[in-house]
Image (spheres, helix red, strand yellow):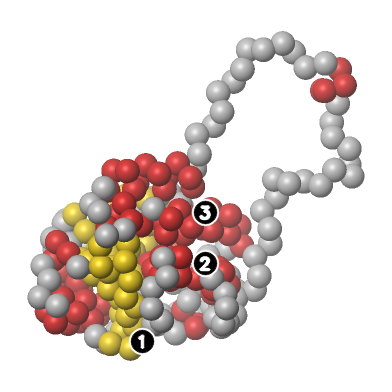
């Protein structure tokens, strides 16, 4: 059995924070793979399902970020799991937005959610680091992680959440390299190589008509709102990701 944990702070006013990308990713996994409805247990919310052949318990701690380890530790002890059976999805300042890295063990690197989990179960659990970028100045970090995603982030955030959910079975199977490769390629596909073919004709070189729609523009995300019935996990996550302010526990 795998304990799949998303990190964030509970409550609608925190839902759009960069710090809550772990919650967003877990919501999309649960929705895409047909897990059970969320219910309260282990000082958080849980949903059950399968990723490939692996039975999975999804957990969103409701203890606030600084105390995430309380919920994780309680679930781990109840099911008699080892730290190696725990996978944690969390925000990562030291990765460019949309990048994903997977590692097992290590320090907390200033992340209070990881620090709390390490205090309760030890450091030897798997971490799925979801890049949110760095504001550039140390003193701006607190406001950055507790700030909402900007509308300009909608395109890469949607692609990231979809790709993580689509390839989550690879993660559950321990195929971390394949998982990272596929997710990163879908979020940031390689640029096409330059061709050396014949030069375009005069007609082909003319600019497109002003009446031609610009299909490269990302759609404007809807304003965040409370999760509604019948929507996918991704739709709910993106709605929550834009327009909700507020501060929360880091």
Is there a contact, CB below 8 Å, between mark 1 and mark 2?
no
Q: Is residue 73 left or right of residue 132?
A: left
Circle 2: element type: helix
The mark that comes first in sequence, 1 or 3, is 1
Q: In this view, does 142 lie to the left or right of 12?
A: left
Nearer to us in this view, 138 or 100 = 100
Q: In this view, does 66 lie above or below 118?
A: below
Residue 234's disc number? 2
Q: Is residue 6 left or right of residue 154?
A: left
The residue at the point 29 percent across, 54 percent down is: 171
What residue does disc 3 label?
159
Q: Can residue 91 be seen in this view?
A: yes
Q: For residue 209, what is the image quadrant? A: top right
Q: For residue 242, what is the image quadrant? A: bottom right
Instruction: Give residue 127's position: percent from left, percent from top.
Output: 26, 59
What residue does disc 1 label?
39
| Distance of label 1 from label 3 (alpha carbons) | 27 Å
Q: Is residue 85 left or right of residue 130?
A: left
- Image quarter where the N terminus lies is bottom left
The residue at the point 19 percent across, 72 percent down is: 117
Q: Residue furthest front?
A: 53
Give the foreground label among 1 and 3. Answer: 1
């Amino acid at each position: 059995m795998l304990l799949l944990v998303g990190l964030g702070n509970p409550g609608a006013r925190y839902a759009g924070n960069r710090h809550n990308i772990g919650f967003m990713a877990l919501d999309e996994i649960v929705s895409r793979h047909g897990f059970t409805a969320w219910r309260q247990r282990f000082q958080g919310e849980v949903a059950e399902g399968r990723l490939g052949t692996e039975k999975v318990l999804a957990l969103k701690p409701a203890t606030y970020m600084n105390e995430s380890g309380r919920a994780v530790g309680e679930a781990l002890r109840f099911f008699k799991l080892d730290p190696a059976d725990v996978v944690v999805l969390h925000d990562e300042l030291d990765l460019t937005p949309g990048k994903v890295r997977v590692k097992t063990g290590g320090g907390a690197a200033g992340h209070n959610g990881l620090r709390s989990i390490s205090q309760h179960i030890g450091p030897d659990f798997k971490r799925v680091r979801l890049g949110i970028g760095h504001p550039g100045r140390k003193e701006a970090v607190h406001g950055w992680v507790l700030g909402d995603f900007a509308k300009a982030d909608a395109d890469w955030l949607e692609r990231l959440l979809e790709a993580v959910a689509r390839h989550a079975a690879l993660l559950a199977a321990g195929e971390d390299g394949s998982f990272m490769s596929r997710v990163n390629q879908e979020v940031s596909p390689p640029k096409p190589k330059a061709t050396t073919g014949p030069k375009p004709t005069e007609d082909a070189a003319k600019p497109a008509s002003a009446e031609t729609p610009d299909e490269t523009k990302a759609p404007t995300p809807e304003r965040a709102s409370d999760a509604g019935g019948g929507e996918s996990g991704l739709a709910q996550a993106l709605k929550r990701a834009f327009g909700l302010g507020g501060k929360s526990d880091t």
